[in-house]
Image (tube, helix red, strand yellow):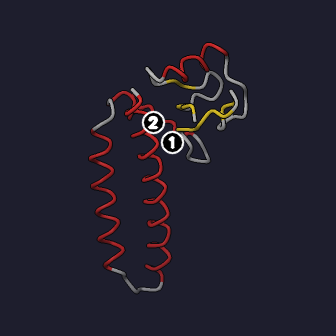
Amino acid sequence: MKLQIENLVKLQNLDREIANMLGNEEAQASDSDFDFDSLEKLDKMRRKRVRLAKTIDKRIIRYYERLKGNKGDKNAVVPVVNAVCQGCNISVPTSTAAKLQRKDSITTCDHCGRFIYSV
């Protein structure tokens, strides 16, 4: 399960990079000056995202996509620092903190629903 959460974090970071590139592409499109290197890089990133998503359970991916769409800050996967979820800034229950330390299952915050992991 540790690999699944690591891949979720990688997926979230990749999604951010893609979103940033898309924002830059839209700005460049208004200048009517296309950067084919950027388009090629964007295509490679999208293919990498597809490969990475295949390494994660389908139910987890569906929940991740739903969270990503619902959370305004786009953080569907957040760390827990000092027993506090960094998504909602609320302390996680002791039982949840213990689960995080075992790293044997994917855990969500009881309050905000985000995937959480221990740092």
> Dots 2 and 1: beta carbons under 8 Å?
yes
Label 1 environment density (alpha carbons within 10 Å; few <14, some 14–19, many ≥20): some
Q: Which mark is residue 113?
A: none
Is 26 left or right of 41, judged from the image as shown? right
Q: Which mark is residue 68?
A: 1
**Residue 86 position by quadrant:** top right
Residue 16 point in image, percent of width and height: 49, 55
In the displayed structure, 48 sits above or below 90; it is below
* Pointer 2 residue: 64
- Which residue is depicted at the point 58% across and 17% down? 98
In the displayed structure, 93 sits above or below 8; it is above
Residue 66 point in image, percent of width and height: 47, 36
Q: Quadrant of the C terminus?
A: top right
In the displayed structure, 66 sits above or below 111; it is below
Q: Quadrant of the N terminus?
A: top left
- Which residue is depicted at the point 33% across and 34% down? 56
Q: CA distance from mark 2 to mark 1?
A: 6 Å
Residue 64 point in image, percent of width and height: 45, 36
Residue 60 point in image, percent of width and height: 40, 30
The three-letter code of the residue at mark 2 reads Tyr
SS state under label 2: helix
- Which residue is depicted at the point 47% across and 51% down? 13
